[in-house]
Image (cartoon, helix red, strand yellow):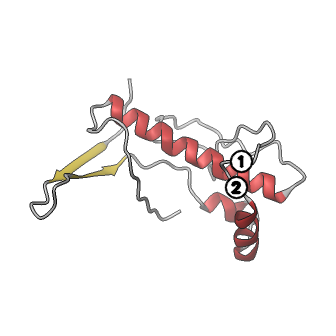
Amino acid sequence: SHRFPNYFSSTDDKTTEEKETWLVGGASNVGCAVLRQQGFSDDELITLSNEIDPTTDILPNLSYYPLTKKGERFPVADSDKEPVLTPVPESRRDYLHGILQAMSEVERDGFVVMGELGATPPFPTRVMTCGGG
């Protein structure tokens, strides 16, 4: 069973035909701060990101969980969860790709958990996200 706070809020916008649903909460400790921790500069992030095509590029066998420090709160509440940022490939591009892929997997897993907890729709069709890390 999951043990973490979740906050749901939805509104009907009478000016449009579609219902807008807002899901607020379920924040993970995974975030882009790990990119700075791993020494990626702004220029490097821009250059390497432009070289990555996630629809066609095949990653080496990397399985990261990009926390900046021990402890996760969502999608799994585990204060003992350790960051996993190894092995580090020789290519900085592959390393960035692996970290970004892992971040997207954590996001996906969070949406799966929210669906299991009763979010409607159970999996989003459009995602806009922001955060501080």
Residue at 74% across / 76% down in the picture? Answer: 43
Q: Measured from the top left, where is residue 96 in percent x and y?
A: 73, 56
Of residues 105 and 74, the one nearer the viewer is: 105
Q: Is residue 103 above or below residue 80?
A: below
* Residue 71 in view, yes or no: no
Q: Residues within 10 Å of mark 1 (few under 14, many from 20)?
A: few
What separation in Å lies between label 2 and label 1 (alpha carbons)?
A: 6 Å
Residues marked 2 and 1 touching at CB (< 8 Å): yes
**In the image, what residue type sits under mark 2?**
Asp
**In the image, what residue type sits under mark 1?**
Thr
- In the picture, measured across the screen, residue 54 lies left or right of residue 75, that is right
Q: In which quarter of the image is the N terminus?
A: top left
Residue at 65% across / 52% down in the picture? Answer: 100
> What is the secondary structure assignment of the residue under circle 2?
loop
- In the picture, measured across the screen, residue 82 lies left or right of residue 110, that is right
Q: Check residue 100 in the rendering and tell me which mark sits there, or answer none.
A: none
Residue 59 falls in image quadrant: top right
Of residues 52 and 3, the one nearer the viewer is: 52
Q: Check residue 53 in the rendering and tell me which mark sits there, or answer none.
A: 2
Residue at 16% across / 61% down in the picture? Answer: 16
Q: In this view, does 111 lie above or below 3?
A: below
* Residue 85 in view, yes or no: yes
> What is the secondary structure assignment of the residue under circle 1?
loop
Q: Measured from the top left, where is residue 73 in percent x and y?
A: 46, 42
For label 1, the residue is 56
Which residue appears farthest toward the right when viewing the image? 90
Q: In this view, does 119 lie above or below 131?
A: above
Q: How crowded is mark 2: few (under 14 residues within 10 Å), some or many (20 or more)?
A: few
